[in-house]
Image (spheres, helix red, strand yellow):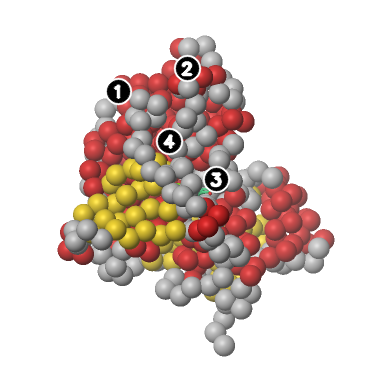
Amino acid sequence: MSQPQRITVLGATGSIGLSTLDVVARHPDRYQAFALSGFSRLSELEALCLRHRPEFAVVPDADSARHLQGGLLAAGLQTRVLVGEEGLCEIAAHPQVDAVMAAIVGAAGLKPTLAAVEAGKRVLLANKEALVMSGALFMQAVRKSGAVLLPIDSEHNAIFQCLPRDYSRGLAPVGVRRILLTASGGPFREMPLEQLPDVSPEQACAHPNWSMGRKISVDSASMMNKGLELIEACWLFDARPTQVEVVIHPQSVIHSLVDYVDGSVLAQLGNPDMRTPIAHALAWPERIDSGVSPLDLFAVARLDFQAPDEGRFPCLRLARQAAEEGGSAPAMLNAANEVAVAAFLDRRIRFTEIASIIDEVLNREAASAVETLDSVLQADARARAAAQQWLVRQGR
Ligand code: NAD
Ligand code: MG
């Protein structure tokens, strides 16, 4: 029998990381955790190491590394603890690794995810921000190294499942007219507009269908998540922004659809549980049990659809604008959003000011071409500085 595949989980302590380890643990004959990273909640990382016995663990600083290394040694584990971004890139590109789950949240995941891509790994991409920031460079690196890129975002995983095996020459040659990207509409889909400025981080994080990390939960409430996903879809499937239509579907049972020129529309359905796309991407082109219960269509009973309202969700409009502008605009959109969401979670700004900050940053900072990783990082830094200036000016 062949050896289990060795998996690195970047962001093992997060929502996606934990779901990944849940699927991995169901199939010890097929998969084995090779390396795990965590940034906060390091006692949870220690517990995960004790359970999965990886070769490597990565933490943010030397003090935490000493602490974790001591605990693991005392428990009789040989796990080596590495530090910081360098450590993350090392476990992403390590010659013994077969697949990398990229599940760090935000721009912090860019370099380690690119390291996995450049090393030609099977890359399970949850960290959409990395692709949004560096789209052209990222996809060039995939083609150059021969990395196998598999989308974890449930919508993109659904689209991938509804496309033919080979769409490498683009969507038109395989008869695709458009991609229909579904969105739940989040917790504020029907809230009276005048209440939106006063919603709390707790309300924004209480997603009706999915349990996720705090940043992506706020993005879902503002629908910036769908905006980032629109840009993600353009890169993954070589689509123009106008070929991607956002459809609000409050039940989150259809994870997305592909519309073909003959009038056929293919959809992927399932319970809203990230272990389905994770298991799909781990095993592709095979199928494995994910632990997700079968879809009960009688319990679902109905599927609703509506068009998104960009007045209620200005972040969606801003993301579409950045997608059409291209160059460094998506990286700036993402950076301004990260600063704004952190400020909202810190209760320094109102929910509706997230869009105001991003709007101002995109209007003040001209987009430029991005030919190198440095130019991406510079655009990210400029947008963060501009967003910080907004906060200072408003006395937050
Ligand atoms: P989370 O907040 O639960 O977990 C984030 C992980 O990243 C944690 O392990 C954390 O320790 C690590 N991390 C945070 N900041 C870091 C830093 N500066 N350096 C290194 N590591 C850092 O988030 P999540 O919900 O698991 O989301 C992870 C990624 O997956 C995000 O990009 C998100 O958009 C994407 N995603 C998540 C879901 C979901 O259902 N949770 C669905 C689709 C896509
Ligand atoms: Mg998604």
Which element is circle 1 on? helix
Q: Which residue is mark 3?
A: 209
Measured as percent of width and height from the top left, residue 50 is found at 74, 62
Q: Which comes before the other along the chain, label 4 or label 1?
A: 4
Give the residue type that dot 4 points to.
Answer: Met
Q: CA distance from mark 4 to mark 1?
A: 20 Å
Please report the residue visible at 49 percent of the width from the left and 37 percent of the height from the top.
186
Please report the residue visible at 55 percent of the width from the left and 32 percent of the height from the top.
204
Quadrant where the C terminus sits is top right
Task: Say which mark, if any, is on residue 363.
Answer: 1
Q: Which comes before the other along the chain, label 2 or label 1?
A: 2
Q: Is residue 288 above or below residue 74?
A: below
Residue at mark 4: C-beta within 8 A of ligand 2: no
Q: CA distance from mark 2 to mark 3?
A: 24 Å
Give the residue type that dot 1 points to.
Answer: Asn
Give the residue type that dot 2 points to.
Answer: Glu
Which element is circle 4 on? loop
Q: CA distance from mark 2 to mark 1?
A: 25 Å
